[in-house]
């Protein structure tokens, strides 16, 4: 899978990045992450449902924030999450 990250996505699998893959049917998902000593490969399979969202082939790579990945791992659509901005300047009022 690390080779897929390099060749197909043109991405380096070693920095602080989690790569997420799914099977063709959308019933399973795999996460690949490097922790500094080796690779972790995590696999999750849904027994009764499928992924509701996945980027089209045109968008081969998609960046997700931590909460969006959590929604995806629960079988949800990460594009429909709403959270406050990650940070704001000191003294700036909250939106």
Image (cartoon, helix red, strand yellow):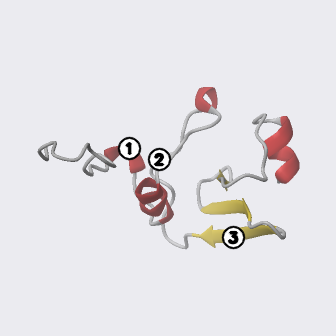
- Circle number at residue 53: 2
Q: Position of residue 81 (x, y in %)?
A: 31, 50
Q: Earlier in the sequence, mark 3 or mark 2?
A: 3
Quadrant location of the N terminus? bottom right
Name the residue nearer the viewer: 76 or 31: 31
Disc 1 vs disc 2: Cβ atoms closer than 8 Å?
yes
User: Which residue occupies 48% across, 64% down?
Assistant: 49
- Give the distance between the C-alpha atoms of the residues marked 1 and 3, in whole angstroms: 23 Å
Name the residue nearer the viewer: 91 or 11: 91
**Label 3 CA crowd tier, 10 Å (few <14, some 14–19, many 20+):** few
Report which residue position mark 3 lands on: 42
Q: Earlier in the sequence, mark 1 or mark 2?
A: 2
Q: Image quarter for residue 43?
A: bottom right
Horizontal placement of 36 versus 3: left or right? left
Q: Position of residue 11 (x, y in %)?
A: 76, 39
Report which residue position mark 1 lands on: 79
In the picture shown, does residue 14 fall above or below 75? Answer: above
User: Which residue occupies 63% across, 37% down?
Assistant: 61
**Label 2 CA crowd tier, 10 Å (few <14, some 14–19, many 20+):** few
């Amino acid at each position: 899978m690390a080779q897929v990250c390099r060749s197909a996505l043109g991405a380096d699998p070693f920095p602080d990045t989690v790569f997420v893959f799914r099977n063709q049917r959308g019933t399973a998902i795999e996460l690949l992450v490097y922790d500094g000593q080796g690779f972790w490969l995590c696999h999750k399979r849904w027994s009764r449902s499928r992924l509701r969202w996945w980027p089209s082939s045109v968008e081969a790579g998609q960046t997700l924030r931590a909460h969006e990945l959590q929604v995806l791992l629960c079988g949800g659509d990460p594009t429909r999450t709403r959270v406050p901005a990650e940070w704001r300047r000191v003294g700036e009022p909250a939106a």
